[in-house]
Amino acid sequence: MANTMIDLGEASAVPATEAGPPVPWRALLGTLSVLLLALTAGSAVSTPFPAATVIPARLADSTFIDGDRLFLVTRGLIKTYSLPDGHLLSRTTVAVTGSVSNVLEAGDTLVVSYQIDQDGDQGTVAVVAGTDRVLWRRLDGLAGASGRAGVALLSTGYGARNQAVWQAVDLHTGALRWSTTQPADGYTMVTGPIDEYPQWFVTVQADGRIETRDALTGRITATRHGPPIDPHANSIVWPVGDLAIIGGPSGGVTAYRLPGLTPVWNTRVDLSQTWMQTDCGLVLCAFRPQQGIVVLDPADGRLLWESRRWAYAEPAGPYLVAAMLNRDGDAPAYWVLEPRTGRVLGTFGGWDVVASDSVQPTLYGIHLVPGQNTIFYGALDPVRRSATILGRAEAVNGNCQTSADALVCRRADASVGIWQLR
């Protein structure tokens, strides 16, 4: 029964900005077929589903995924496991004063951020993996680390003028390499993550001055003057791929190519009070909280379509997979859209898309069996709107994530289950 494909069918086309999606009858039949699998899987004579690798854990333990590494944080001890096989690689002792908020592996070093007080301020400590040897500790938050470059990036809270400060420090000593302070009336954004470390800093000041800075060296690589911005009046500053999207209350919104800040296009489309998806595939996606999506052509910035229906969308092959803003209880969770028109192509029925720590070539989903702590997991095909079942997981409540060809879920007894996806 492994690798069973379920055709979830098509949904009739509807305009992106008109009436709601049609009832996906074939998608509902697809859901029923999954339920039949749940009833018959135990007695069918077929290739068995893959077994899980189970890691014991307590309810208070936390997990973090960084590429092909899984970190289990338990009582001052960080256990590092490889993905997708779940082999224990190291045990690292870390003394922290509060809950751990992030763990990154950079070469032979673990960089750990943690809460230091009730106000949510962060500290960061670097420890040699597999030991208790502290390399350095700073009262700053962790923004990224690169073992290849030997550097960690810290966000150092706020200075005397309530301005965010960024510092790049040596990964092995904590010595300062360079720092920059966000303008009092401006923005600083990071973009182009490589090896969990950004590639560029982009700073925009109120008078319209823009500069890019190499995130490893701190060297300014380009400067340009654009229209003035007002950080208190619906200005927009977002990194999207190799573009910096910048606009203020006047002058529209301009896309600049990074790192040279070459203007690519200017648009008068209203993007106020939006946030932009860093990767939306063939289009640019901007979202207004509780007000839907605005989609632009990345080549010239023109409006392609907009809709108040979708709360979120992400690329999946040549299409977008979108979640509804106001979902009825029986409606499918995710819908497949044609990206340049917003036309609804179909759904994944009762399947939920599983979150990932990065953009994956394959879209994975889970299907909860009603009334049970059981899921089916599989590969979702946005082209055919189908699900290929890869396995079944018991004692799982749906809290899952994918990374490095592995499905990682917390189980009902708080343990961690790992299922290989290939």
Image (cartoon, helix red, strand yellow):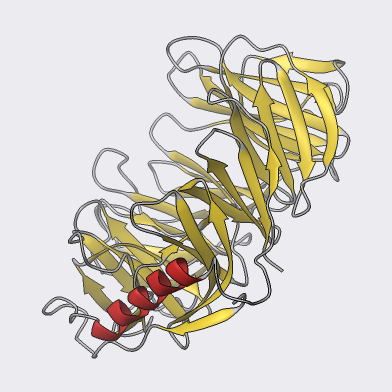
Q: Position of residue 417 (x, y in %)?
A: 63, 46
The extreme front residue here reads: 43
Q: Is residue 341 above or below residue 293?
A: below
Which quadrant holds residue 174?
top right
Residue 303 visible (yes or no): no
Quadrant of the image containing the C terminus: bottom right
State the residue in front, 294 or 202. Answer: 294
* Closer to us: 414 or 159: 414
The N terminus sits in image quarter: bottom right
Q: Residue at x 20, y 59 (%)?
A: 329
Q: Which quarter of the picture shows residue 47?
A: bottom right
Q: Is residue 253 left or right of residue 121?
A: left
State left or right for residue 87 relative to residue 219.
Answer: right
Using the rendered view, name the quadrant where residue 247 is placed.
bottom left
From this view, report whether residue 276 is shown above or below residue 43: above
Residue in the image at 37% along x and 84% along y: 338
Judge by depth and name the residue closer to the eye, 193 or 319. Answer: 319
Q: Is 214 situated above or below 102?
A: below
* Coordinates of residue 79 in the picture (x, y in percent): 76, 30
Q: Residue furthest left?
A: 19
Q: Position of residue 218 (x, y in %)?
A: 71, 40
Q: Is residue 415 visible?
A: yes
Residue 184 is left or right of residue 103, and the answer is left
Q: Is residue 120 above or below residue 36?
A: above
Q: Is residue 295 left or right of residue 100?
A: left
Tell me which residue sits at (44%, 17%) in the image.
161
Residue shown at 66%/12% (left/top)? 96
